Structures are given as structure tokens and as C-alpha cells.
Image (cartoon, rainbow, N blue to C red):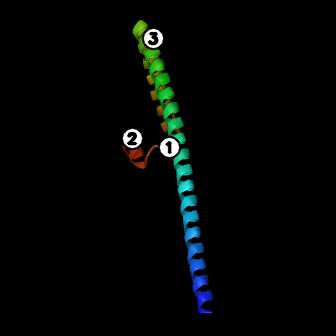
Amino acid sequence: MKKQIAELKREVSRLNRMISDQAEEAAHGWYQSAADRASSLYSGASHRASRAAKQLRTQAHSVSETVQQNPGTISTAVAIGGLFGVLMGLTIARSSQPDPDWFRRWQR
């Protein structure tokens, strides 16, 4: 009986070691898989960011060339845009809120 109990204890220990080894291998495989996926995602994002930066540089260069070739036209467009923005802002501010009470008091 003692021999059988000792043998069962050894068998349980051996099974525990096997389960532990398999769990360790599974965890390592999962970690490696997650690390590989993260690496590929980072690589893809880096590539897209690089392409976007290159496109932005190209467009900025194109705009700067246009501004250098047509300084009067660009200045006029910016001035008209600014004036339109100010007028629009004043219109919205005027229509959205009535005059404050203190303003009416000093107007009389």
C-alpha cells in the first residue's frame, strides 16, 4: 500500500511538472505571438506615418511655390478671408446674445 501511495505521489508530481511545462510553453507562445502582432502593427503605422509626412512635405512645397509666384493674389485672398471671418463672427455674436443689462443702462 505504501509503495502504491509513493508511486501515485511520483506520478502526480510528474503530471504537475508536465502541466507546468506545457503552460509555460503556451504562455511563451502567446507572448511571442502578441509581440509579433504588436511589431507588425507598429511597422505598418510607421510606414503610413512616413508616407503621410512625405505627402505633407510635397503639398507644403507646392503651396510655397504658388505663394512665391503669386504674392499679391495670396495676400488678397488671405485679407478677404480674414475680413469675411470677422464679419461672420460679429454677426453670430450679435444674433446669439442680447445686449447685457449694463450696456443698456449706459446707453440711455
- Which mark is on residue 107? 2
For the question of whether residue 68 can be seen, the reply is: yes
Please tell me which residue is depicted at 44% across the width and 13% down the height of the picture: 74
Q: Is disc 2 surrounded by few (<14), some (14 to 19) or many (20+) residues within 10 Å?
A: few
Distance (Cα) linking label 1 and label 2: 17 Å
Distance (Cα) linking label 1 and label 3: 41 Å
Q: Is disc 1 surrounded by few (<14), some (14 to 19) or many (20+) residues within 10 Å?
A: few
* Residue of label 3: 66
In contact (CB < 8 Å): disc 1 and disc 2: no
Disc 1 element? loop
Viewer-side residue, 10 vs 35? 10
Q: Position of residue 54 (x, y in %)?
A: 47, 23
For the question of whether residue 76 can be seen, the reply is: no
Disc 3 element? helix
Q: Amino acid at mark 1?
A: Gln
Q: Residue furthest left?
A: 106
Q: Earlier in the sequence, mark 3 or mark 2?
A: 3
Dot in front, 1 or 2: 1
In contact (CB < 8 Å): disc 1 and disc 3: no
Q: Is residue 19 left or right of residue 94?
A: right
Please tell me which residue is depicted at 50% across the width and 22% down the height of the picture: 55
Q: Position of residue 57 (x, y in %)?
A: 44, 21
Vertically, is 14 above or below 107? below
Q: Residue furthest bottom?
A: 1
Q: Earlier in the sequence, mark 1 or mark 2?
A: 1
* Residue of label 1: 97
Q: Position of residue 44 (x, y in %)?
A: 54, 36
Distance (Cα) linking label 3 and label 2: 50 Å
Q: Amino acid at mark 3?
A: Thr
Q: Residue furthest front?
A: 3
